[in-house]
Amino acid sequence: MRPSFSLHALFLLLAGIALLAAPASTQVADQDLVVVVELEDAIGPASASYFIDSLEDANERGAKLLVLRLDTPGGLDAAMRDMIKAILASEVPVATWVAPSGARAASAGTYIMYASHFAAMASATNIGSSTPVDMMNPDDSDGPRRPIPFPMPDSTDEEAEDNAEAESDEESESNDEAADNEARSEDEESSDEAPAPSTAMERKIINDAVAYIRGLAELRGRNADWAEESVRSGVNLPSAEALEAGVIDMVAQTIDELIEQVNGQDYKAPSGGTKTLALESPTIETVTPDWRAQLLAVITNPSVAVLLISLGSLALVAEFYTGTGVAGVVGAICLLVAAYGMQMLPINYAGLALLILGIALMIAEFFTPTIGIFGFGGAVAFIFGGIFLLDTDVPGFDVSIGLLVGVALVMLILVSIISGAALKSWRSRVVSGTASMIGEDVEASSDFAAGEKGKVVYHGEVWDATSVEDVSKGAILQVAGVDRLTLEVRAKA
C-alpha cells in the first residue's frame, strides 16, 4: 500500500507543477505582447477614450509595445491633448504608424506622432498641416479655408542690416533700377505671402501650438524647426522626406516590418530614464472598440446629437397630447443622452440657443396656430442653430446642412398637420357634452306657462325645461341653454 501511495503522491506533485507552470508560460507570452490600435477619421472624445482605455489595458497586461495605426485629417484639441498625456505617462512605449499607403497624419495627428516614443510611416503617406483650425483664414471666401502662413525667423538682425546696406549700395548706383526692383519685390511678396495674424488671440493660439509641439520634438529628439514651420505655415512632408528631415524614425510598409525596426531601439521612460525595447517572440493582438466606445462615438456625433434633441422635444410634446408616459420617458432619455454627448464637444452656445429657440417656436405652433409664422421662423432658427452649433472647423465635427433642412421640414410638416387639425377642431361644432345640445330641437310633453318649469323630450329623454313664453303641449322648441339638468327653450325660429 505504501508504494502505491508514493506513486499517487508523485503523480499529484507533477500535475501540480505542470499547472503552476502554465500561468508562467502565459506571462512570458504577455511580456512580448504587441497591442495594435487602429484610429481612422477625425480624433474626438470617442476615439481618444478608446485609445486611452486600450493603452491603460496594455499597461495592466504588461505589454511590450502598443502600435497606433493612424489615418486622420486632424481632430479636437482637447481630445488630442488627452491622448498625448496618456502617451507621455505610459510605461508601455507607443509606436505611431501612419498607414496604409494613402493615409495621413494631419493637424492633431502630427502632434501625436511627435509625442510617441517611435514614429513611423508607410510609403505614399504624409504628415503636417499642424496649424490650429481656429487660425484658418476667415476672409478666403472663394475656396476652402487655408492656414495663415507665419514668417519664420530664418534671418537674424545682422543679416537684415547687411541686406539693408546692400540695398542702399544698389540704390546709390542706379535709382531707377532699384525702384523697379523694389516694385517687383513688393508685387511678389503681396502675391506669395498671406497676412500675418492681426489679433492678440490669434498670436496666443499659434504661439501656444508652437511651444507645445517644440516641447514634444525636444523630448523625442525630432526636428523641432520643421514642427514649428508645420504649425506656422501648414507645410507637409511625404514619408521619405520626413525620414530624411528627422521628423519620423522609420518607414515601414507592414506591421511586421515596423516591429522588426523598433526591436532593440532605446526609448525614454516616464521616469526620465532610458529603456531598450526587446521583443524576442512578439505576439500581435489587434484590439477593437467595445460597445461603450461605439456608443460614445455615436452620441458624440453632432448630427446624432441634433437628431436626439429634435426627437426628444417632439416626444415631450406628444406626451402633452397623449399623457401615456411612454413618450415622456423616451423624450427625457433622448434629451439627457444628447446633453451628455454635447458636453464633450466644443459647443457654440449661441448656436445651441438658436437650435433650442427654433424647436420652441415650432412647438409653439402646435398650441397657438399663427398661420405658420412661428413654424417658419422656428425652422429658420433651427437650421442656423445647427450650422453654428459646433465651435470648431475640424473635419468630421460639423452638422450636415441636408440633415438640418430635412429635420426642419419634417417638423414643419408635423406642425402643419397638427395645427391644421387643431384649427379645424376649433372651428367645428361641439358634438359632445351639454354644449352640444344648444340649438337642438325638443318637443314639449306638457303645457307650461312662461317662467314655470315644464317637461320636454330630447332624443327620447324627458328633461325639465323653462321658457320666457307660454308653451303648449306638442310644440317643437329649440334649446337655448342648459342650466344643470334644466333646459332653457324658446320657440323655434
Image (cartoon, rainbow, N blue to C red):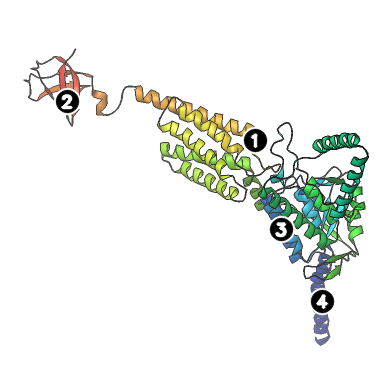
What is the spatial separation of the Cα atoms under label 4 and label 2, in whole angstroms?
102 Å
SS state under label 1: loop
Q: Quadrant of the C terminus?
A: top left
The nearer-to-camera label among 2 and 1 is: 1
SS state under label 3: helix
* Residue 414 visible, this angle: no
The nearer-to-camera label among 3 and 1 is: 1
Disc 2 to disc 3: CB gap under 8 Å: no
For marks 2 and 1, the one nearer the N-term is: 1
For marks 3 and 1, the one nearer the N-term is: 3
According to the picture, the residue beneath numbered tag 4 turns out to be: 17
For marks 4 and 2, the one nearer the N-term is: 4
According to the picture, the residue beneath numbered tag 3 turns out to be: 52
What is the spatial separation of the Cα atoms under label 2 and label 3, in whole angstroms?
79 Å
What is the spatial separation of the Cα atoms under label 3 and label 1, in whole angstroms?
29 Å
Horizontal side, residue 264 vs residue 301: left or right: right
For marks 4 and 3, the one nearer the N-term is: 4
Q: Amino acid at mark 1?
A: Ser
Horizontal side, residue 456 vs residue 174: left or right: left
According to the picture, the residue beneath numbered tag 1 turns out to be: 400
Q: Amino acid at mark 3?
A: Ile
Q: How far across and how far down the image is residue 82, in percent?
A: 70, 57
